[in-house]
Each structure stands twice: as C-alpha cells, then as structure tokens.
Image (cartoon, rainbow, N blue to C red):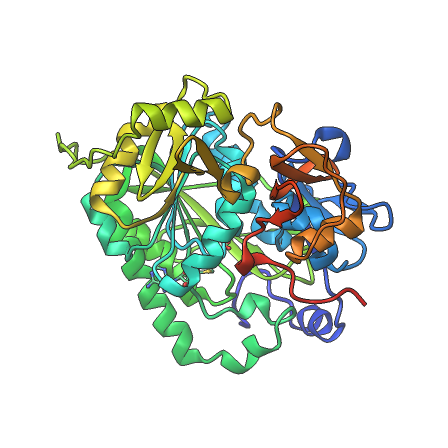
Amino acid sequence: MQNVAGFNQQAFEAVHQSEEQITSIRINPSKISDSKQGMMSDEVKTSKVPWCEFGYYLNERPSFTFDPIFHAGSYYVQEASSMFLWQVLQQTTGNETQKTVLDLCAAPGGKSTLLASYFTDGLVVSNEVIKQRCSVLVENITKWGSDNVIVTNNDPKDFKRLPNFFDVIVVDAPCSGSGLFRKDKNAIDEWSEENVNLCSQRQQRIIADIADCLNENGILIYSTCSYSNAENEDVLDWIKNSFNLESVQLKVEEEWGIVETVSDAESCYGYRFYPDKVKGEGFFIAAFKKTSTQKTNQKFKETILAKPLKKEIEVVESFMPIRENYFLFKQNEFVRIFPQEYQQQLQIIASNLYIKKAGVELGAVKGKDLIPSHELAMSSLDMKHINNFTLNKEQALQYLSKKEVNIDVHSTGWALMKFDNISLGWIKALPNRINNYYPVEWRILKDKK
Ligand code: SAM
C-alpha cells in the first residue's frame, strides 16, 4: 500500500494494534420518532455520525440481543464508514426520493435498509445472488418494515433483461475485505494478493452485467471495504473506459478525515476511509453519472399478479384499512400489499427475476378471518385500531424468546405486542391461553445472564 493515496503506515499499524472498537447504529426513522433519535437507552450515550442523518456512534457495545426494539428493526447495527452512502445519495440525487433503485449485492441488508429510509417514496430492489444469504436479507428487510422493497435472488447477468430500468444502482461489491482487518481478525488470514486480483476481475464482471440497466442521468455507486488500488481506483478507470459514465466529485468536510483520491488513468474521483483518519472502518466509495444511453423502445415482459377474491379483500379490510395508494395481490395463500405507483415495475420484475419477497405480507385468509403475518406487525401500515399490549422489558424478552407471556388480556383475538411503542409481533388470545406467534426461526435463543 506504499503508493496508495492517504496511506500512513505508522498510524495505520497503530490503529490496528490499538484494539479500539467502534460501534455505530443507524436508526429507522419510520419506527423511532425524532424526539427519541439517538437515545437507544439511557446508559448508552450517543453522538452523531456526521455524514448520515440517522447514524449514531455508541459509547459502548450493548447486548443488542437483549434490546427488544433491535428485533423490531428500530435500528441497524452498521459500520459508520458505510453510512457515507447517505451522503453520496444526498449529493447525487438531492431531494428526489421517488427513484427506482437497485442494490445489487445486498445481503445482509445494511445498504438496502439505508436506501429504504432514503427513498421513502421510491422503489428499492434488493438483490443477493447467494441463496443462503438471502434469508438474512429477507429477515432484515422484513424487520425494517418498508413496503416499497422487493428482494430478489438473481445473478447480476439476469439484470441484462432490464435495460434502462434503474435510476440508481448500488454495487457494494464482494471484495478482499482488508478494510475489516481491525474488526475481524479472520479477514487477515483470508487475505491474499491473488484474491485481490480475483476480486478485481469479479467486480468488473459484475458491473459489466448491470451497466446497461442504468437509465439516462442515472447514478452508479460503487463501493468496497478494500484498500487495494486493484479493487478501487483501477476499477474506476476500467468503468470510465468501458461505459458512458462520468465520475462525480463529492464534497467532503475536512474534519471527517475522508481522503479524496483521483485514479491514475482516467482521473476518476474515489473516497477512501482509513480507520486512523475516520471514526469508522476501511471503506472505499465512488459515484458515476450516466451521460447517454441507447434508448430502446423495449417493452418489458410482465407477469399479471394474482388478485385476491372479493371476499378475501373484505376479510382483509375488516381487519385493517387499505389506503387507496396501495394494491393487494396474492402469492400462494398469502395476501400482500404494495404501493400502487410501482405495480407495473413489480409485474416486470416478477416476469424477469426471482422474487423472494415483495412489499408486505398481510396474512392468509381462512374463512372469515385473517391470520396476520409477522411482516404486517413489522410494517408501518395503519394498525391503530388493532388491540395491543405494552410489555415491560422482561415480558418483551419472554415474548421474543417465544416463551409464554404473562399478561392479563381481557379480550380474545389477535393483538400486537409492543415495547416502547414499537410492535414486536402478534399473539392470539384464546379464552384459556395466549398463543405466541413470534417467528420461531427469529426467536432469541440465549438466556439473559
Ligand atoms: N451491501 C451489503 C450490506 O451493506 O449489508 C454487503 C454486501 S457484501 C460487501 C457483498 C455481497 O455480494 C455479498 O452478500 C455476497 O454474497 C455478494 N456476492 C458474492 N459474489 C457475487 C457475485 N458474483 N455477484 C454479485 N454479488 C456477489
């Protein structure tokens, strides 16, 4: 790294030997109100991550497992440098939040949840190629509760079917991982020069697969958690050489400690994060704007989504109000909800990609009843009129462990369990017992000491 911009060997080694660990979270603005932002708990005081509106540093690393609202997607534990994506969005897309966005390498969902909070009235397609990693992505997206996200499980080359489809594409590429050396000692053992070169080739292949999906004036954001030129500036040079994309220079405040670099051959701007200079881990990010595109009058294939029966819609509407800017569709026995505005995009994606989850699963209609899904409890849809119980912390942890919950209920039927005014999930109260409907695969397995 001797010739890499901003590298200071002594400071870099010292910070890696210091064992200092930085913990940061990004809160979910649709679940935590302004007055409570950054107040995870009284004991853990916080300060703001300067480049991300909802990012906070914690003074210590609490046990997230035993914080009930963590399980309800009230915040995401995310490394602070990665939150710079927020800043890139602000500087490249401004206040235009109604965009069609692709997060191509999405698991476990850090960038996708940030995108969902940014593009509140947009559409976010969150894709992960590795099937096993999709389950954690679905879990995190479900808990985040946004209704405008589609999770897909596709190879980047499958997106060739969608030319000029996206306004913003984020490629948080698989990389050699040197930026995580301080946080994860295993990353050191796994690192090799050979792997850096393999990653660089793969990063180029991935971008080549999706470059045509970007719309005119669209933004491509490329990031890695590697320090290697081969995975960063060299990839930028290759992008500039290969596509109609212009490098975008970003503004960084001096006190943030972020190093702006310029690639050798094509003078593209990149932003390097060193743990000895910023309060965060190693990271690299760059943005490009598409200058021109070959307009095709392509008509995309669309899958017509199954509509619920009239009587099923009546059952759903007797459970909760359905606002007119949403539409309902069926997947297997489940009724799902999605923003009306993006119905056509959903139909196109359903026809061309493999969808793991789209919008919010409301539940299954059984006779005259709706069996509500956990996704509904996690969403921000209007459930004001549904019975709910406020649990104390001990009861909340019992509930989240899928144990028996000791509460006095005075009426039977479905009810939301809440902690700190945030929904944790469903119970069904029967005349003589309470059934805990927390998803078994997400329950807390550890006991609190
Ligand atoms: N964006 C994620 C976040 O913020 O939580 C982290 C993404 S991680 C750096 C890179 C992801 O790329 C991994 O989930 C990995 O499974 C996926 N990946 C691996 N090989 C890939 C390939 N050939 N094409 C696309 N994605 C790939």
Judge from the rendering whether residue 56 lies leftward or rightward of residue 134; answer left or right.
Answer: right
Q: Quadrant of residue 336?
A: top left
Out of 263 and 296, give the one closest to the viewer. Answer: 296
Q: Is residue 361 above or below residue 448?
A: above
Residue 241, position as x, y percentages in the image: 27, 52
What residue lies at 21% left-to-right and 40% top-to-bottom? 163
Out of 153 and 203, give the one closest to the viewer. Answer: 153
Out of 217 and 68, give the one closest to the viewer. Answer: 68
Residue 207, position as x, y percentages in the image: 31, 54
What residue lies at 61% left-to-right and 58% top-to-bottom? 443
**Residue 327 visible, this angle:** no
Q: Quadrant of the C terminus?
A: bottom right
Which residue reaches farthest bottom? 189
Judge from the rendering whether residue 60 lies leftward or rightward of residue 117; answer left or right.
Answer: right
Residue 7, position as x, y percentages in the image: 60, 65
Q: Quadrant of residue 49?
A: top right
Say how many tags the image has. Answer: 0
Where in the image, quadrant-wise, is ligand 1 located?
bottom left
Which residue reaches farthest right? 43
Which residue reaches farthest top? 324
Out of 312 and 421, give the one closest to the viewer. Answer: 312
What residue lies at 58% left-to-right and 47% top-to-bottom? 83
Q: Is residue 368 above or below residue 434?
A: above
**Residue 401 visible, this angle:** yes
Q: Quadrant of residue 30?
A: top right
What residue lies at 52% left-to-right and 62% top-to-bottom? 225
Residue 146, position as x, y percentages in the image: 50, 36
